[in-house]
Image (tube, helix red, strand yellow):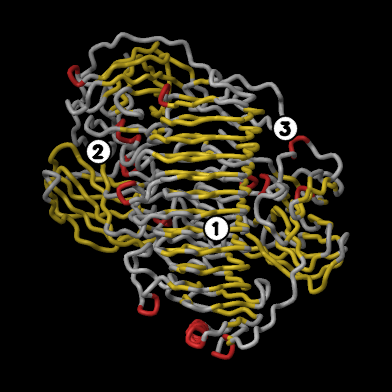
Amino acid sequence: MRRSGAAVAVAGALIALGSVVAFPGMSSAATSPSPFSITGRGATVPFTEIEAESAVTNGERIGPDRVYTHLPSEASGRRAVRLDAPGEYVEFTLPKAANAMTVRYSVPDNASGTGITAPVDLRIDGTKLKDLQFTSRYGWFYGGYPFGNTPGDKPHHFYDETRTMFGSTLAAGTKVRIQVASTAVAPWFVVDLADFELVPDQITRPAGSLSVVDFGADRNGTSDSTAAFQAAVDAGKAQGKEVYIPAGTYTLWDHVVVDGVTLRGAGPWYSVLTGRHPTQRNRAVGVYGKYVSGGGYTGGIRPHEAGGPSRNVTLKDFAIIGEITERVDDDQVNALGGAMTDSVVDNVWLQHTKVGAWMDGPMDDFTLKNSRILDQTADGVNFHTGVTNSTVTNTFVRNTGDDGLAMWPDRVANANNAFTFNTVVAPVLANNIVTYGGRDIKITDNVVSDTVTNGGGIHVANRYPGVNSGQGTAVAGTITVARNTLIRAGNSDYNWNFGVGAIWFDGLNEPVNATINVTDTDIVDSSYEAVQFIEGSTQTVNFSNVNVDGTGTYMIQAQAAAKATFTNVRAAHIGAGVAIHNCVGTGFAPAYGTGNSGWSLSSTVCTGQWPAPNYIYDGGDPSPSPSPSNSPSSSSSPSPSPSPTACAPGSGDLARGKPVTATSSTQSYVAANAVDGDAGTYWESANNAFPQSITVDLCAVTPVQRVVLTLPPSAAWATRTQTLSVLGSTDGTNYTTLSPSAGRTFDPATGNTASISFTSANVRHVRVTVTGNTGWPAGQLSAIEVYGTGTTPSPSPSPLPTGNLARGKQVSASSHADVYVAGNATDGNTGTYWESANNAFPQSITVDLGASVTVGRVVLRLPPSAAWGARTQTLSVLGSTDGTNYTTIAGPAGYRFDPASGNAVTVAVPAGARRYLRLNVTGNTGWPAAQISEFEAYAS
């Protein structure tokens, strides 16, 4: 690490209960506000927060950095301090008296993904008080949604928090130091921040109340107290008495179901519920209302959980700190859940569960307030299915694995709900605050900051299953988005590969038709654009008294049709130097009212690429970076397309590069990965949804007698057994079993390969059906190889068809819709095709030819069916030798695809050596997306 030679006070700001205590010499790069510095908005919290980079340290400051999978990107303010040698420390000076602290930190994972736990010293005025245990058990997830714990690509969810009481009240001015004593267990420690507070004394047992201890609850946590808690709350309801949780740590292996009762503790620092069933891992600590039949929860309902919603429940003054270390969406391992009508949750601390509060309606008049929700593997709160007249207010949310605060009216309408006066910081995935559908929703007086990936600060959308106007669940009525502050909100979406707006609107399921009023709002230092419209259409959004100060790219990114009005909207420090990116033309219909400044409707571009963020907010270079310009337009006269090379079984691995389909896939782990010849890519089916299958078309009936299945060879893939069978068909409809279902072990020590031989059969279609996997709840294959009579596995890819240099080669795209993946464009089958995300131009598809070869002509095809009406796609072709630096070899022009002439176009390019070819599409008259069935390259 870089060493400063001496402890330095890093310039910055200390934030205390809505006030900013400034240190001298604050650098211009550190002036983006804290979420606690906004007067009158956000949660009123009981702690004073000090960022590690603003404290005294002899460690290394890291950041600022907003790139997903980088450690600083998940830190509060995108900065932290790294300690990697004994004696290195971060020292905080108390601005006011405190008797407790919470530290946000990161330590590395271990090779198995189960995490490590390492001690650090907690020192008070130089004297060691105790060890703090920093653990990575609850963090470090990998890959695409729904993520896994096995180390691999896309590491994220790096940070966790631990809390401790000092044993006495420390005066203002006391030095509190976190210091590394040893790096034997953890080679480094990253400290993000510390929250200091004065915890009040324990709340004594209310007169006339029942105690869970009287019913046998173990306050030392050595035995399961679920039955004791259940007996206590049942008695409390029957007798009309409150139920008290004395100070202690209680182990619960299952839910406590509450109805018509008050359950309260001695305070969230004193009364703690924890635990998880040792063998039934889908059972864990939680306090739940009764489920409503036919409501949001569609799993099995036990008798004592039925008959919901629960009514007249009060939960207050205790903590639920769980033991959830993974994300399994079907598991009900949330801190709070079920349905609760006419109920209140007040002053609770929810941590280390899957979701803080996943409320499955229908239910009405529910309030969650004055609480803390931390370190969840999924959402902070989700009002799911028929939740009405309900509120989350004055609640602090940090480090959720999905949306911070969400509403999702799946099949039953949500209406008249509100998220107000909350502070939501650093959701690792998705949005700080969102309503997916819903009628007359209010999102007001909140502060949100530091969105990490695949989401924005505030989102209004018709997205996700069960959201549609036919069921009355779509966005409707008046949506009020008022008096919110968004700081460093929005970020890149790793599927779309472009930025998401700080505030964004999406009509994926159907157009958004409602009155959406965005008023008196500050959008500060956005990671990409401030406002985004994408997919479908949105109308009408009314922006009034909005301040946009600092964007990484644009003020507005219009990727779908929208109607919006702008009055008293001020803009400054726009990173792209242009206010609006609009590739939908008149589909984006802004009404420019009075009082606007710093931008205009004429400041508009539609480029062929997305610019990298340019952060010039408050202290950066005031000269805007030039926006990307289109290359000079040129057009080649279409020439007759070459006849496609006939698809044939070939020799060696008969499946290599052939058309392939699957029953499902997860994220980018599509079926085409299993026939691309790359051992590092793989197909993964939908999780927790066996059986699943993958089917390859060999192009003609041919004798086969062996299938070789592989997984990536990396040792990160632990040994697993997949239960599977092999089937064959001559017509793609009627299948016979070639090899019956059996457990096949994949072991990295022996190549992570399973070879399955069977009696020779004449088939065209080969299917592998997977019914179980001991290593992950999905079908997974890096390669499905098929061999005929007398053939052996080829150590290298089989020769590609002569002529088309792109056939069967690796291909990637900026995005894809549904099953229309990039691999379809090089599979030799004109009946399959790639389609990008809709309403999201520009889009690109890139093929790696494997080596630099001479390319003089590109042929592009769409399916020849007359069902494909004629269309014109505006596109350009780029080439590269290294995959990084591209030059335009055919400038942007409109190319007409017409089924009457084969639905193909030819683009002549200057002959030259290129390894990578990229097609950049900015428009399509036939569909609001890029579409290519075959991307072919020829030497001449």
The residue carrying mark 3 is 618
Quadrant housing the C terminus: top left
The reply to whether the C-beta atoms of the residues labelled 2 and 1 are less than 8 Å apart is no
Residue type, mark 1 in image: Ala
For discs 1 and 3, the disc positioned in front in the rendered view: 3
Is 859 in front, or is 765?
A: 859
The residue carrying mark 2 is 659
Is 432 in front, or is 889?
A: 432
The residue carrying mark 1 is 111
Q: Earlier in the sequence, mark 1 or mark 3?
A: 1
Residue neighbourhood size for the residue with mark 2, other residues' Cα within 10 Å, grouped as few (<14), some (14–19), many (≥20): many
Under circle 3, the secondary element is: loop
Q: Is 687 displayed left or right of 4 in the figure?
A: left
Percent across and percent down for residue 76 are 67, 49
Residue at horizontal 64 percent and vertical 40 percent from the top:
65
Residue type, mark 2 in image: Pro
Under circle 2, the secondary element is: loop
C-alpha separation, residue under disc 2 versus residue under disc 3: 53 Å
Under circle 1, the secondary element is: loop
Percent across and percent down for residue 739 are 19, 57
Q: Earlier in the sequence, mark 2 or mark 1?
A: 1
> Does any portion of residue 70 appear in the rendered image?
no
C-alpha separation, residue under disc 2 versus residue under disc 1: 36 Å
